Image (cartoon, helix red, strand yellow):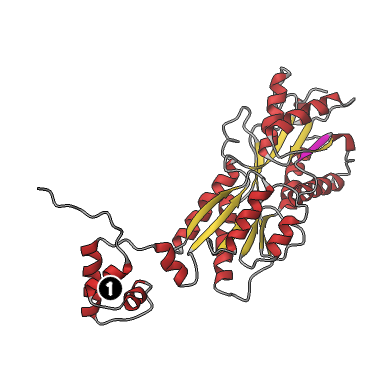
């Protein structure tokens, strides 16, 4: 007859009893906070194997003062830029013995607040936090109550936690300079929400390049909306309603470029013959579209690694942590720009 197997959960007290030790001694051994004679260690390990004990790892970590887990808050994991950032952050956290929990908000303010409050309950030791919606003051208030938060990619004005951003102004200037070098003079700017730091800074880079080239910025070719493919389609329609069309567009996101390409195809047109396009991010699809998208490469992996490094320094009470870190961007030239001699007048 088969031996009856008990389904009762094995407790730490069961291990202590079998090893002939106090529960406190076994607990301290499990937490690596006590050095015991080899004979005593062997008794504990034998009891663990005999009983097939699987302790509550979260409880053990909390007993040492932390969860050994970081949270990464992202608005959208379907965006390849955020996916690459998440992969790099997990890689960096794992290398240091930390788990990474992915927290997707879909720009829902209640979810953003909920994840920040995880720090109050010690579900995570720290939060790497990204949003791409303008803050009405709620996020600033919630984050100001916390210490172990690092902002990524987008600012929350008024917050005083460490921040890691790409050099958006540099990127906007590089993108526009490339269009100007190709002979374009009528250049539009399509951005995300105007209140966002990234949008304002990329627009500043655009304006700087235009001014240095002695070119005017036409207000009817400046448009703001969501960082989405749908807004790219809408923006193209508005541009084509203008009395004089631009010959080129700098879009502050590759997603916006996808929408612009959708709109061109719907009109029976193609880039760059009808419109030269430059994006921002260098998402993994930009080398596979038709045409391949010229863009500004954000250092997504470096953003993830740097944010984790700063967070671990925060957790270790490092006194020399920069308030803001800026990472350089890179121009990636592909097929979506035509020289002005090739552009229909």
- The segment highlighted magenta reads 187-191
Q: Is residue 155 above or below residue 246?
A: below
Instruction: Name the element at disc 1.
Output: helix
Q: Residue furthest left?
A: 1
Left or right of residue 273, residue 286 in this image: left
Location of residue 118 in the rendering, given as x and y in whole percent from the top left corner: 58, 59
Up/down of 208 relative to 10, above or below? above
Label 1, on which residue? 16
Overall secondary structure of the magenta section: strand
Could you tell whether 22 is left or right of 344 in the image? left
Residue 146 position, x and y percent, is 65, 66
Is residue 225 at all visible to an observer of this figure? Answer: yes
Q: Quadrant of residue 42?
A: bottom left
Q: Is residue 4 above or below residue 58?
A: above
Residue occupying image coordinates x 41% and y 68%: 60
Q: Quadrant of residue 161?
A: bottom right
Q: Is residue 161 left or right of residue 195?
A: left
Residue 182 shows in the view: no
Q: Residues within 10 Å of mark 1 (few under 14, many from 20)?
A: many
């Amino acid at each position: 007859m088969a031996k009856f197997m008990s389904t009762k959960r094995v407790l730490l007290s069961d291990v202590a009893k079998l090893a002939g030790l106090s529960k406190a001694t076994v607990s301290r051994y499990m937490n690596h906070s006590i050095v015991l004679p080899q004979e005593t260690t062997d008794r504990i390990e034998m009891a663990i194997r005999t009983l097939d004990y699987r302790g509550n790892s979260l409880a053990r970590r909390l007993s040492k003062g932390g969860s050994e887990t970081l949270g990464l808050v992202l608005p959208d994991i379907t965006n390849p830029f955020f996916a690459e950032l998440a992969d790099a952050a997990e890689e960096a956290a794992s290398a240091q013995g930390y788990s990474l929990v992915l927290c997707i908000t879909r720009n829902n303010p209640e979810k953003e607040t909920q994840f920040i409050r995880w720090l109050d309950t010690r579900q995570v030791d720290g939060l790497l936090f990204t949003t791409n919606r303008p803050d009405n003051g709620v996020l600033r208030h919630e984050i100001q109550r916390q210490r172990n938060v690092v902002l990524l990619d987008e600012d929350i004005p008024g917050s005083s936690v460490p921040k890691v951003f790409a050099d958006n102004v540099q990127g906007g200037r590089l993108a526009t300079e490339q269009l100007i070098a190709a002979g374009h003079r009528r250049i539009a700017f399509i951005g995300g929400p105007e209140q966002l730091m990234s949008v304002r800074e990329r627009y500043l880079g655009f304006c700087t390049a235009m001014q240095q080239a002695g070119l005017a910025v036409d207000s009817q070719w400046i448009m703001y909306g969501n960082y989405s493919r749908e807004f790219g389609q809408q923006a193209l329609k508005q541009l084509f309603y203008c009395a004089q069309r631009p010959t080129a567009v700098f879009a502050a996101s590759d997603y916006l470029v996808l929408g612009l390409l959708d709109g061109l195809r719907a009109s029976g047109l193609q880039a760059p013959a009808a419109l030269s396009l430059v994006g921002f991010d260098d998402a993994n699809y930009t080398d596979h579209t038709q045409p391949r998208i010229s863009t500004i490469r954000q250092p997504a992996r470096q953003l993830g690694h740097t944010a984790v490094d700063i967070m671990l320094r925060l957790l270790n009470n490092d006194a020399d942590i920069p308030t803001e870190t800026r990472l350089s961007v890179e121009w990636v030239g592909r097929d979506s720009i035509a020289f002005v001699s090739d552009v229909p007048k």
